[in-house]
Image (spheres, helix red, strand yellow):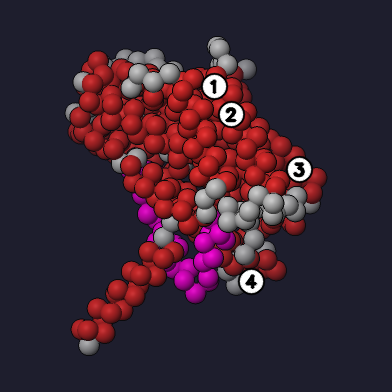
Amino acid sequence: MAKTKKRSIWQHLAIFFAIFGPGFITGSVDNDVGGITTYSVAGATYGYQLLWTLIPAAVVLFVVQEMNARMGVVTGKGLADLIRENAGVKTTFFIFIFLLGTDIMNTTTEFAGVAGSMQIFGVSKYISVPVAALLVWLLIVKGSYKTAERVFIVFGLCLFVYVISAIMAEPDWEAVGQAIAHPSMNTDRGSVSMVIGLIGTTIAPWMQFYMQFSVIEKGVKLKHYKYTILDVLTGVIATIVVAFFIMLACASTLYVDGQGTVINDASDAARALELLAGPLAAQVFGFGLLVAAIFSAVILPVATAFYICEAFGFEAGIDKKWEDAPQFYWLYTIILILSAGIILLPNAPLIGISLWSQRINGILLPVVLICMMVIINKKEVMGKHTNTLFQNVIGWGTITVLIVLSGMLVIASA
């Protein structure tokens, strides 16, 4: 009996690790340069005050990612394909034009992270950005999904260096507990904008498309779907843990006696950490930034090229050759060239691009989620795998909160 049970456990583990990847990678890559910048600015400006936002974000992230994975496994189609089939080509076109522009801004932010992180180690952006862009291009164009996925998992694990960075900053754990136990939020323009940015970077629109894409590429079957749920959970935990410790590191060192420190990007945070917590803390923070930048500079253009091609009926996928999916690879290449090229321009408004890309993510997210919620509740699409009441409450509740926050930001800006 014991032997059979042990064999069963090993079989479960073997299946889980065979399926493991899409949920963890999608969650981990969510902590991209734009996300790290947003978390850093939130910690430096508001201290521990906004840490509590990561708790509801974790719940919402899990529910949304589970819906993504379920739609992919049940239908075998990506989200873009489903939106086109259910909302029509015109609606799909306008949604994806805005998403394409935002994703180019997001990818530009990733290369800004490459430049900023390597400058901490004394390497010019005119060397680091072209080299990173070439390596990123080669990984996708010359590699396979299996190879890319293994690299992505290693990148995701490397992001946990932020735990070390935060511990070196010596946080006030009692104050951290108080901030989480007694959540508060100001209603001024800056606070509302920051909360929208935090939500927009924790649950980004483009990652909904990547999640379904990766589940389909992986070939996950419905009979193994319970293992995918566990994979999604590991991704959510990874996202929230890394985000928490980034905010903690900056809040512990850059927010002093109720006064915040003005920083423009994550590399500014690393340099400030060097003065307050020592050069090693800055280098650890900078290494995490570099990993996140390269990680996201690969996945974000892939997700964008995939959902654009899928929406309009072109072949797409990392395992396809260039001649089989030329539109996919050309779009991927053009996004990389544009994004890396902007970074090399003198006086490019990188700070504005970074922060506004996250805010636009937060504003566009309800549009994508509304499409998802409508589709996933259609029995003719999902059969018996439509949403439960709890999932619908969380989904529609998230959409309502995002719309209210966006309205508050518009009013505060008037």
**Residue, disc 3:** 93
Q: Residues within 10 Å of mark 1 (few under 14, many from 20)?
A: many
| Number of marks | 4
Range shown magenta? 214-241
Sequence order check, earlier mark of 4 and 3: 3
Instruction: Please tell me which residue is depicted at 55% across the width and 33% down the height of the picture.
Output: 107
**Residue, disc 1:** 343
What's the amino acid at mark 1? Ile
Q: Residue 285: image x %, image y %? A: 31, 29
**Residue, disc 2:** 339
Mark in the foreground, 4 or 2? 2
Q: How many angstroms separate mark 3 from mark 2 (CA)?
A: 22 Å
What's the amino acid at mark 3? Phe
- Residue 383 - label: 4
**To which quarter of the image does residue 185 belong?**
top left
Label 3 secondary element: helix
Residues at marks 1 and 2 touching, judged by CB atoms closer than 8 Å: yes
As displayed, is residue 411 above or below residue 82? above
What's the amino acid at mark 2? Ser
**Outermost residue, bottom side:** 1
Sequence order check, earlier mark of 1 and 4: 1
